[in-house]
Image (spheres, rainbow, N blue to C red):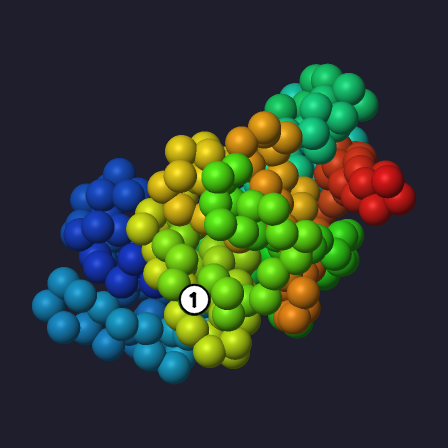
Amino acid sequence: MELLQLEYFITVARLEHMTEAARSLHVTQSSLSKTIQRLEEDLGVPLFNRTGRNLRLNEFGVRFLRRAERALLELEQGKQEIRDLSRQEQSTLELAVNTASTLPNILREFRKQMPNVQFHVQMLTTEEMVNLLHRGEVDFCLSSPRIEGDDVESLIVHIDRILVAVPKGHRLADRTSISLLELKEEWFVGVKRGYGTRDFVDAVCQSAGFVPKYVYEGDEPARLSSLVEAEIGIAFIPSTAKISREHIRYIPVSDHELVREIALLWHKSRYISQAAQMFREVVIEYFRDISEQ
């Protein structure tokens, strides 16, 4: 069995389409098909159910995919560990987040500690982030809600209260607290479904007896404050994402527990480089400081 066969198999398994996989791997379709066929011959079983150019992993394929991904992850971690020990290459930290309000301050502090380390950050839905996490393709995830799994380490770093942001002239702007049902007829601005905080807030509102009505749904949480200020709608905004603006009021909810967990996540089998260890320490210290304020 060859390493190339495993790499090709994983790509085909994820895309479940031979033409797209060949394009992604920059090889001919016939070459890819022959490589997968040789792998199946080595194993003595088919790994896919085939319908034309479309493929679906069968039971053998599903089980083998988990092992193949783990094998390639171990090899990649070995390479990273050697690079880390030899320090011949500049490190790059791979990060994925579905909550980004605290990230600029965290990255600023991390850069002070390790100015030569680069980082690559992806803002993803919870489902997208889970896929990368389980495949071991990121060093850390910063997530709300917490994600659990046999191959995932999870550390809750902060409990964050969620507030209702309203424009200064809103009918509730002078209130010190509100109940959720008072928001039943309001129009909201928010992120799309699939982001942890949005899904959590929607579920709490439904338990209170209504479904929030959204006039805007986007991918950039930082834009919500501007939309509230422009009186497009009101928003649920975590305390850590508050922006000090004269024309916005932030009001706590009195009758429901509207808080979210922020967790730092990493794959148990992924090698923790020196840069990654420092990042973890910076994250823990950052949230410890804001919790004490």
The N terminus lies in quadrant: bottom left
The percent position of residue 173, horizontal first and vertical second, equals 56, 46
Q: Nearer the viewer, residue 155 or 163?
A: 163
Residue at 19% from the left image edge and 73% from the top image edge: 50
| SS type, badge 1 | loop
Residue at point 19% right, 44% down? 28
Q: Classify 165 as above or below 5.
A: above
Q: Position of residue 80 (x, y in %)?
A: 66, 38
Give the farthest residue toward the bottom. Answer: 59
- Find residue 113 and report its horizontal and vertical position in percent: 80, 23
Pick out the residue farthest to the left.
52
Residue under the image location 59 percent in, 41 percent down: 249
Question: Would you call the spot at circle 1 few (<14 residues within 10 Å), some (14-19), or many (20 or more)?
Answer: some
Image quarter of the C terminus: top right
Q: Position of residue 81 (x, y in %)?
A: 72, 39
Position of 141 compared to 214: left or right? right
The answer to whether residue 190 is seen in the rendering is: yes
Residue 273 is drawn in which quadrant? top right
Give the residue type that dot 1 points to: Lys
Can residue 5 be seen in the rendering of this structure? no
- Tally the marks: 1
Q: Is residue 169 above or below residue 21?
A: above
Query: Label 1 belongs to which residue?
Result: 184
The residue sitting at the right extreme is: 292
Q: Residue at x 36, y 41 (%)?
A: 232
Please tell me which residue lies in front, 242 or 221.
242
Viewer-proximal residue, 124 or 5?
A: 124
Q: Is residue 198 above or below residue 223?
A: below
